[in-house]
Image (spheres, rainbow, N blue to C red):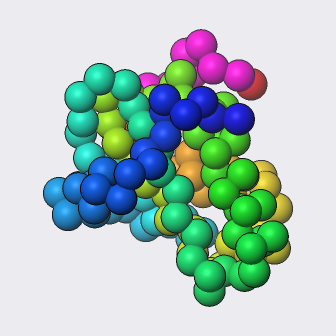
C-alpha cells in the first residue's frame, strides 16, 4: 500500500494539479503532473464510467501499487494524478503497469533503474 504521506487527498490539491499541471495520455491512463515542493504525492481518479464500486476500487488499488513499486525510481517533488480511462476495465495488471511506466517516461519523471523493486 502506498503510505498516506505520498497521496493527494484534498480536492484543492487535485484542482491545483488539474489547472496548473501538464497532462500526458496513455492507452489506459491519463497522467497529470505538477512540479511541487517536498515529497512526491500521487492522486487517483476512477470514474463511475469504468464500472461499479468493486471494479473502481480494484483499479485504484492497482494504480496505487504501481506508484508504490516505482516511487523510488521517479523524480522527487512532483504531484501526480493518474486518471483511469474506460478501457482499463478487465485489462491485466502487467498491461496497465507497462502503460503507466511509459507515461512516467514520457512525462520525464523516470530516473531509471535505481533502488526500486524488480
How many numbered discs, if any?
Answer: 0
At 75% from the left and 80% from the top, the residue drawn is 52
Residue 30 percent across, percent down from the top left: 46, 65
Q: Quadrant of the C terminus?
A: top right
Q: Is residue 58 left or right of residue 12?
A: right
Can residue 107 be spotted in the picture? Answer: no
Q: Is residue 24 above or below residue 42?
A: below
Can residue 89 be spotted in the picture? Answer: yes
At 52% from the left and 64% from the top, the residue drawn is 45
Q: Magenta region: which residues?
A: 110-117
Residue 40 percent across, percent down from the top left: 39, 31
Residue 58 percent across, percent down from the top left: 77, 61
At 59% from the left and 13% from the top, the residue drawn is 115
Which residue occupies the foreground of this view, 6 or 117? Answer: 6
* Residue at the limit of the structure toward the bottom, as seen here: 49
Q: Main secondary structure of the magenta part?
A: loop
Q: Quadrant of the N terminus?
A: top right
At 62% from the left and 86% from the top, the residue drawn is 49
Residue 92 counted in the magenta span: no
Amino acid at each position: 500500500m502506498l503510505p498516506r504521506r505520498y497521496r493527494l487527498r484534498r480536492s484543492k490539491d487535485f484542482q491545483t494539479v488539474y489547472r496548473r499541471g501538464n497532462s500526458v495520455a496513455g492507452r489506459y491512463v491519463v497522467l497529470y503532473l505538477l512540479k511541487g515542493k517536498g515529497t512526491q504525492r500521487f492522486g487517483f481518479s476512477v470514474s463511475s464510467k469504468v464500472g461499479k464500486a468493486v471494479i473502481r476500487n480494484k483499479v485504484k488499488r492497482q494504480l496505487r501499487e504501481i506508484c508504490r513499486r516505482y516511487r523510488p525510481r521517479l523524480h522527487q517533488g512532483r504531484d501526480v494524478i493518474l486518471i483511469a480511462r474506460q478501457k482499463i476495465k478487465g485489462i491485466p495488471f502487467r498491461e496497465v503497469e507497462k502503460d503507466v511506466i511509459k507515461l512516467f517516461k514520457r512525462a520525464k519523471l523516470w530516473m531509471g533503474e535505481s533502488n526500486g523493486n524488480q
